[in-house]
Structures are given as C-alpha cells and as structure tokens.
Amino acid sequence: MVFMAKYLVRAFSTSLGRHSPIKTVAIIGSGLMGSGIAQVAAANGHTVTVVDQTDEIINKATAAIKKSLGRVVKKKFPDDPKAQQTYISDVMSHLTLQTDAKAAVKSADLVIEAIVENLEIKRKLFASLDKAAPPNTIFVSNTSSIPIRDIATATNRLDRFGGLHFFNPVPVMKLVEIIRLPETTDETFTALESFGKALGKKTVQCKDTPGFIVNRLLVPYMLEAVRLVERGDATPQDIDVAMKLGAGYPMGPFELLDYVGLDTTKFIVDGWHQRDPDNPLYRPSEILNKLVAENKLGIKTGQGFYSYNNK
Ligand SMILES: CCCCCCC[C@H](O)CC(=O)SCCNC(=O)CCNC(=O)[C@H](O)C(C)(C)COP(=O)([O-])OP(=O)([O-])OC[C@H]1O[C@@H](n2cnc3c(N)ncnc32)[C@H](O)[C@@H]1OP(=O)([O-])[O-]
Ligand SMILES: NC(=O)c1ccc[n+]([C@@H]2O[C@H](COP(=O)([O-])OP(=O)(O)OC[C@H]3O[C@@H](n4cnc5c(N)ncnc54)[C@H](O)[C@@H]3O)[C@@H](O)[C@H]2O)c1
C-alpha cells in the first residue's frame, strides 16, 4: 500500500513536469539571473523572450548565454563539436532578446521578473505589465528578499501571482523555491510547480516569509562573515578557506558574495534593515557599503572582495 502511494506520487509528479501548461515565457531582466533562467527554459523547449533596457545589455546577455551553453555542451557531447553546435543553435532558436516588455508579455503564459532588487521599480514594472498581458498570464518575481505581496499588489491578479526563486548559477543549481500567497490559486501553484519540474529543478514551497527558506538562513551567515572581517578577527581569504574545508561549502562566503553581486546583497541588507531596524542580524555593513559606492560589485564589475581582472 505504502509502495503504491509512493509510486502514484512519483508518477504524478513526473507527469506534472511533462504536461506543464506553460509553454511561452517572458523574462524581464537579462542579468545574472534572467539570462540563466532564459537559458534553462529555452533548453527545455519553451519559447522564451528576454527583455532588458538597452541593446548593449541584451548583447552582453546573449554572449553570457552562449558562453554558459558552451560549458553545458562540453559535458553533454564531449568530443562531438557538431552535436555541440547543433544543440547551441537549437536552444538559441527558442530565444528572442529585445527591449519591449509590453510586447513580450502579450502572448506569454508566464512572466518572470528578474530586474534590480528594488520594490518601487518592480511595482512600476508589474503595474504596466498587468495592463499589457492577457488576463490568464501568470506573473512571478524572482526576488531574493522582497515580500511577494508587496510586489503583487501593484497588479490586479493576486490569484495568478507567486514567487519563483531560482539560484545562481541557474543552469547548475537544482532548486527552485515556489512562494505562494493566500490568494494564489491551486491552478497557479500547480502550473508553477510543473514549470519548475519541466526545467529539471527540484521545487520546494514556502509561505511569503522574509527570505523564504534559503536566504533566511544564508543572509545572516554571509553578514556574520563580513562582520568577522570588520572586527579584524580574520581575513576574507582565511574565512573562505575555512568554510570550504571545514564546513564543506562549495564556495566561501566572500567568493559567494562576489558571485551573487554586492549591489544585490546591499539591496537585500538595506531592505531588511529598514523593515526590522532593531534586528542586529541585518545591521548595515561599512565594508559592503564602501565597495558598492566604489562600483566594486563583485565578478560582474571585475572587482569585489577579490579582483577578477586577470581571469
Ligand atoms: C548577504 C547575503 C546575500 C545572499 C544573496 C542571495 C542571492 C539569491 O537570492 C540566492 C542565491 O542564488 S544564493 C547562491 C547559491 N549558489 C551557490 O551557493 C553556488 C555555490 N557554488 C557552487 O555550487 C560552485 O562553486 C559552482 C557550481 C558555481 C562552480 O563549481 P566549481 O566546481 O567551483 O567550478 P567549475 O568546475 O567551474 O564548475 C562546476 C560545474 O558547473 C558547471 N558550471 C558552472 N557555472 C556554470 C554556468 N554558469 N553555466 C553552465 N555551467 C556551469 C561547469 O561547467 C562544471 O561542470 P562539470 O560537468 O562539473 O565540468
Ligand atoms: N544574483 C543572485 O545570485 C540572485 C539569485 C536569486 C535571485 N536574485 C534576484 O533576481 C533579481 C535579479 O538579480 P540579478 O543578480 O540577475 O541582477 P543583475 O543586476 O545581474 O540584472 C538585473 C537586470 O535587470 C535589468 N533591469 C533593471 N530594471 C529593468 C526594467 N525596468 N526593465 C527591464 N530590465 C531591467 C538591468 O538592466 C539588469 O540587466 C533580483 O531581484 C535579485 O534579488 C538574484
């Protein structure tokens, strides 16, 4: 009986992935996350339009996707350059990159927002997309730290709104958190779950609680690492070595901060500090503020806690 129940659960969850009602996806924001999500959605057969603010940014994103696909095919088709090229061309043929968000959402089953971590900018975007997209289109935000409700109330579709939180680098990280509002319908939730599975990800669900699951635990850890340095207790290099070799993490906290982006990190810390000013966990960090003021944002600008100019 137990075996039968397990079998049915597994069969159902597999069929969910295969029969995702989401075929056409618009992704707003072509940075680290938007380009990664676009790549994975296109590689799994979705028709994807990615939107950003300028052609220059779009070109950069196209190059980043091709570079990442280059890494994927090396593993998928070792020693077969022709198959590698065919795969890359096929994925790219499912992708359009452009600058008109309203046009992009007109035929989308799902809109994924992956723009800068700023509530007012996200609300403004969603308010305008709400008017341009068909009524049945589902909207999600990939926000790291902003309550989904605060973003969703800019629209009139709370029943078709949720959070879909991917992890960086999207082509490699296997998890997607699905955030559900009380108004999110079962139909919307199931569609998001099947979309996550269709992308080959493991999904977990969480209420609209600060940081959801992963960032609720990760952010205090990362900030405590920065405070160790601010107190002069240890260097970033030694802390990174310690956490990799002593705790088994694939990256140390400073490598990960540079990887995630120090601007995104600062947006998260400032937002949580504003919401919860007495909580010492989210006290602003002097080092982080200084690096961001100097446009040292991590890997994406070539300099953060570490320098990447020679890489
Ligand atoms: C204040 C706090 C702030 C918190 C912010 C939160 C942010 C956010 O909301 C949540 C997050 O995302 S949190 C962040 C969550 N993220 C983490 O915690 C990440 C932690 N880091 C890691 O898991 C690893 O260091 C990496 C996977 C990044 C690199 O692995 P590695 O072993 O050091 O180096 P490797 O050997 O080069 O790569 C290994 C394999 O991956 C492949 N590949 C890599 N990049 C690729 C790409 N872009 N495309 C395609 N493929 C890519 C590569 O080809 C290779 O394949 P192979 O078949 O094995 O040859
Ligand atoms: N960096 C991470 O590791 C990570 C992980 C998970 C979630 N997130 C979240 O994903 C979102 C994007 O983060 P990112 O790291 O990809 O940022 P990023 O800075 O790499 O990219 C953001 C992109 O959005 C574009 N953009 C800004 N406003 C826009 C608008 N109005 N219309 C169209 N494009 C616009 C920018 O030009 C930029 O290309 C944020 O909400 C962030 O919190 C980030």
Image: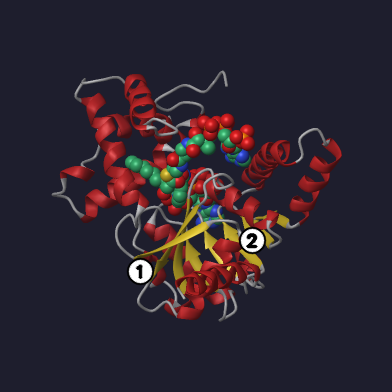
| Above or below 26: residue 137 | below
Marks 2 and 1, Cα distance to the nearest angstrom?
A: 26 Å
| Residue lying at 26% horizontally and 24% vertically, measured from the top left | 229
**Label 2, ligand 2: CB separation under 8 Å:** no
Q: Kindly indicate whether the residue at mark 1 contacts the one at mark 2 (C-beta within 8 angstroms).
A: no
Image quarter where the C terminus lies is: top right
Residue 156 visible: no
Q: Tell whether 152 sits left or right of 173.
A: left
Of label 2 and label 1, which has the lower sequence position?
2
Relative depth, front residue between 6 and 85: 6
Tell which of 2 and 119 is nearer to you.
Answer: 2
Q: Position of residue 261 (x, y in %)?
A: 44, 38
| Numbered label attached to residue 149 | 1
Compared to 278, does 113 lie above or below?
below
The answer to whether residue 65 is left or right of residue 9 is right
The kind of secondary structure element at disc 1 is helix
Three-letter residue code for mark 2:
Asp
Residue 79 appears in view: yes
* Mark seen at residue 100: 2
Q: Nearer the viewer, mark 2 or mark 1?
A: 1
**Mark 2 element type:** loop
Front-most of residues 255 and 122? 255
For label 2, count other residues whose C-alpha is less than 10 Å away and answer few (under 14), some (14-19) or many (20+): some
Q: Looking at the picture, how far across and down is residue 16, in whole percent?
A: 58, 71
Q: Amino acid at mark 1?
A: Arg
**Where residue 164 sits in the image (x, y, percent)?**
47, 61
In front here: 225 or 282? 225
Q: Which disc, if any, is residue 307?
A: none
